[in-house]
Image (spheres, grey):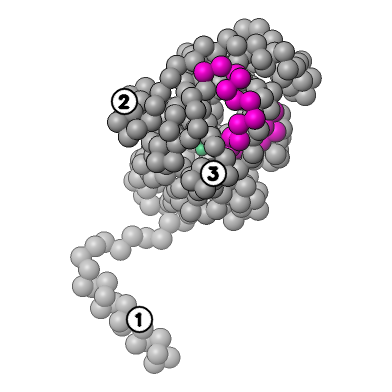
Amino acid sequence: SRRQFATLAAGAAVSAAVPIRRARAAEFVFKVGTNVPESHPLNVNIRKASEELKTTTDGRFDLQLFANNQLGGDSDMLSQLRSGALECFLNSGVNVLSTMIPSAAISGIGFAFKDYPTLWSAMDGKLGAHLRGEINKGGIVVMEKIWDNGFRQITTSTKPIVVPADLQGMKIRVPVSALWTSLFKSLGASPTGINFSEVYSALQTKVVDGQENPPAIISAAKLYEVQKYCSITNHMWDGWWFLINRRAWGQLPPDMQEKVAKTINTWCMNEREEVAKQNENLRTVLMEKGLIFNTVDPLPFRDALSKSGFYADWRAKFGDKAWDLLEEATGKLS
Ligand code: X2X
């Protein structure tokens, strides 16, 4: 029709005026959702993977990042992943993914991993393979390497946490997760499950007094604006699995699956380095922003967990087989 012709002509005039090469539409467009701000190494390295894949697949595969909860909070993104509305989602087995696959949460046991070497040998080894198996059984594809979030520290607006008694009755935000809630209840706190998308405002409006996250997130999400103290508890480690909708993954030809997996896992290794550096170095920066730091002796916290039955309860829930796999990496936990 004439109107269609007019529109086409206008479109042609516009593209002729803009000196860029017209990109061929990608054959496969995968959206990927994350829950942290753009500047976090998680997103920086997913973007790098995306650029590399654009080149190495000649534009056939387009990984489009939607960072910082643009697609909704973790609970929304998990639903979208399951329905296929979202092809990829970064989440840990301890976070909302555990509401669907409880057995994937075992890496979040309190004070399990003493340092990064212990942790990576477990997550890149038998424990990680077990966890990916559990996620696969739940109908979700998962990339081999887990992306680092880091060892977690407690921030509050009210007081530093030095001994377990300081947590008594404290209103603290935890992710939406039975294990996380149980951990902080066992330490005497009063935890509330809230998606990360709501954390800044929950702290600002004093719905909760504290939260717990690694320095890289405290910095990227500017939580120092609404928190005063940061206590180095290292109470648990957490990371993000790169999750993919099974049907979407099945549509990729095998050679492309291989290329995508390899690229994602390679940039993940770079992310791990950057996150570890940030979690180490950002302390000074955060102090300059006004956060008051204190170190913590973890032993009384671990004792409190043992006495409350935390380890025994979760061992019973996860089962001896999975628990033995965890303790093979960490040593005896209870
Ligand atoms: O929700 C959190 O606190 C975060 C961003 O660290 C996780 O994804 C576990």
* Quadrant, the C terminus: top right
Question: Mark 2 or mark 1, which is nearer to you?
Answer: 2
Mark 2 neighbour density, 10 Å: few (under 14) some (14–19) many (20 or more): few
Relative vertical location of residue 307 with respect to residue 49 in this rendering, above or below = above
Residue 170 part of the magenta segment: yes
Tell me the kind of residue under disc 1: Leu
Marks 2 and 1: CB-CB under 8 Å?
no
The residue to which callout 1 is attached is: 8
Marks 3 and 1: CB-CB under 8 Å?
no
Residue visible at 48% across and 46% down in the picture: 204
Question: Which residue range is magenta in the image?
Answer: 162-183
Task: Please report whichever mark, 3 or 2, sits nearer to the chain's N-terminal start.
Answer: 3
Spatial separation of the CA atoms under disc 2 and disc 1: 56 Å
Mark 3 neighbour density, 10 Å: few (under 14) some (14–19) many (20 or more): few
Question: Mark 3 or mark 1, which is nearer to you?
Answer: 3
Tell me the kind of residue under disc 3: Lys
The residue to which callout 3 is attached is: 206
